[in-house]
Image (cartoon, helix red, strand yellow):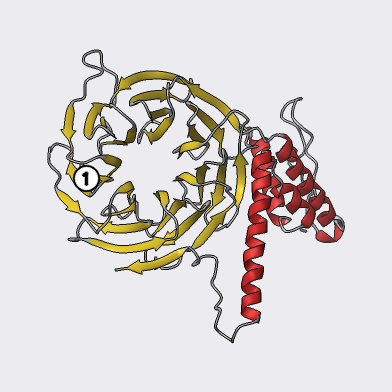
């Protein structure tokens, strides 16, 4: 005779300690939960509201510079180390964990235009308005701390620098583009393409031989170090101030433009941008990608910081304070948790990349609850009430008024174009998309 015995495992319903919660068995049959969608919507709504309540993005500030901050450099191997250059030629090394300055160097006579690390990470290179390229020890030493270990005097003014990812080579820009080896006093190669001056240059972090430069004639030039000359050149209506390559996609970069927008390009088709990112009401000065390649941060003359998703046209977050003035440089930390901004009122500020994220160690149950809330917010993201709360941001009065004015100008332009099209011959006034409106021409 076959006998079936009912057994229960005590681990499924008994508590391990008195402080633990009671384990309640649950039947997941959907027929027994007719109000599941309503309960999940309420939980999603509460999760979005709690994000607004706990949104405290400002972490701290680094004070000490005597002039405006001009550039940043992140240490390639130390998350808590940041290098900053100022308009008075001073370079400071910061410990972000303790928010203190660990080293001060009077590096240049004039503005520090750029700082990069060598391939080994033991040295860093700085350039300034005094036409010098100086190599320094990255670690503080007791002997000759203020003296560079190598100095090169350039024939032209240098306005930017970028380093190769795998070789001891770096590129500088100014009147022309030069390629240098770390131990040589003369440039290895020189690139020209009928341009008065360059003001930014960036090496591709994936395809290491590619680099792009922003020029004074409103163009963006793409170079290949293996070729004899430039590859492509695209002209825009206004000047591009800075550009940043996507660290996860070798063919994508984003440039910050004077017309208040940012443009994401694919180098395989430079004639039309992949996306146009709008929300700033002032010239965009700097841009930097997150290490995941999914987002980037931008700083503008409208005294605000905005975080954009790569595939979205509008920002998901905006940061501003009453005392923060025009932004001059931006950086995204290599652990993808913090955003660092430098402004012309001599202050460096640290912000959370996610405004409502909790800092510190999370318990397993707490992490599971947060993941559940994120899943609910994503599930009900298209609902009008949740979408309204999620997108709402408080901005300064001057930004609010400027956005209303720009909206009026844009509507007026569209209405004028529609009237011209309605009273002209068919095809006389073609449709021009927003993505290709500010691109003038492309040269090969």
Q: Residue furthest bottom?
A: 426
Left or right placement of residue 355 versus residue 69 in this view:
right
Q: Position of residue 294 (x, y in %)?
A: 50, 52
Q: Residue at x 18, y 25 (%)?
A: 149
Q: Position of residue 282 (x, y in %)?
A: 55, 46
Q: Residue 169 falls in which quadrant of the image?
A: top left
Q: Position of residue 70 (x, y in %)?
A: 40, 33
Q: Residue at x 14, y 36 (%)?
A: 183
Q: Residue at x 44, y 60 (%)?
A: 237
Quadrant of the image containing the N terminus: bottom right
Left or right placement of residue 317 versus residue 298 in this view:
right
Residue 28 makes an appearance in the image: no
Q: Residue 85 falls in which quadrant of the image?
A: top left
Q: Secondary structure at mark 1?
A: loop
**Considering depth in this image, is 136 or 178 the residue closer to the camera?**
178
Residue 76 makes an appearance in the image: yes
Residue of label 1: 167
Where 181 falls versus 343 (above or below)? below
Left or right placement of residue 412 versus residue 271 in this view:
right
Q: Position of residue 91 (x, y in %)?
A: 34, 25
Left or right placement of residue 205 versus residue 275 in this view:
left
Q: Residue 93 falls in which quadrant of the image?
A: top left
Quadrant of the image containing the C terminus: bottom left
**Considering depth in this image, is 360 or 389 the residue closer to the camera?**
389
């Amino acid at each position: 005779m076959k006998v079936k015995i009912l057994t229960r495992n005590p681990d499924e319903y008994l508590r391990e300690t008195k402080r633990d919660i009671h384990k309640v068995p649950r039947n997941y049959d959907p027929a027994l939960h007719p109000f599941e969608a309503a309960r999940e919507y309420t939980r999603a709504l509460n999760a979005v509201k709690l994000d607004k309540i706990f949104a405290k993005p400002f972490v701290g500030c680094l004070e000490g510079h005597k002039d405006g901050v001009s550039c940043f450099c992140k240490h390639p191997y130390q998350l808590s180390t940041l290098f900053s250059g100022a308009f008075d030629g001073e370079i400071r090394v910061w410990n972000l964990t303790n928010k203190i300055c660990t080293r001060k160097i009077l590096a240049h006579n004039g503005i520090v235009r750029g700082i990069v690390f060598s391939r080994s990470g033991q040295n860093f290179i700085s350039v300034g308005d005094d036409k010098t390229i100086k190599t320094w020890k990255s670690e503080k030493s007791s002997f000759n701390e203020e003296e560079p270990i190598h100095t090169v005097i350039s024939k032209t003014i240098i306005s930017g620098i970028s380093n190769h990812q795998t070789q001891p080579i770096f590129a500088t820009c100014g009147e022309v583009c030069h390629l240098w080896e770390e131990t040589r006093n003369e440039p290895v190669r020189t690139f020209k393409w009928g341009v008065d001056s360059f003001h930014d240059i960036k090496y591709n972090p994936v395809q290491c031989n590619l680099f792009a430069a922003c020029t004074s004639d409103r163009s963006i030039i793409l170079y290949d170090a293996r070729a004899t000359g430039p590859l492509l050149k695209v002209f825009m209506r206004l000047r591009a101030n800075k550009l940043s390559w996507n660290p996860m996609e070798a063919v994508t970069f984003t440039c910050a433009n004077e017309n208040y927008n940012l443009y994401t390009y694919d180098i395989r088709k430079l004639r039309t941008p992949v996306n146009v990112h709008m929300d700033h009401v002032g010239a965009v000065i700097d841009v930097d990608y997150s290490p995941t390649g999914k987002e980037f941060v931008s700083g503008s003359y409208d005294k605000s910081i905005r975080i954009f998703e790569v595939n979205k046209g509008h920002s998901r977050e905006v940061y501003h304070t009453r005392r923060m003035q025009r932004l001059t440089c931006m950086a995204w930390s290599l652990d993808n948790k913090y955003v660092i901004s430098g402004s012309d009122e001599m202050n460096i500020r640290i912000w959370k990349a996610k405004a409502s994220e909790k800092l510190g160690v999370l318990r397993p149950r707490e992490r599971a609850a947060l993941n559940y809330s994120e899943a609910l917010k994503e599930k009900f993201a298209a609902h009008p009430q949740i979408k309204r709360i999620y997108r709402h941001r408080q901005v300064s009065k001057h930004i609010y008024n400027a956005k209303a004015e720009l909206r009026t100008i844009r509507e007026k332009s569209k209405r004028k174009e529609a009237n011209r099209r309605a009273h002209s011959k068919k095809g006389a006034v073609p449709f021009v998309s927003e993505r290709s409106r500010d691109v003038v021409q492309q040269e090969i």
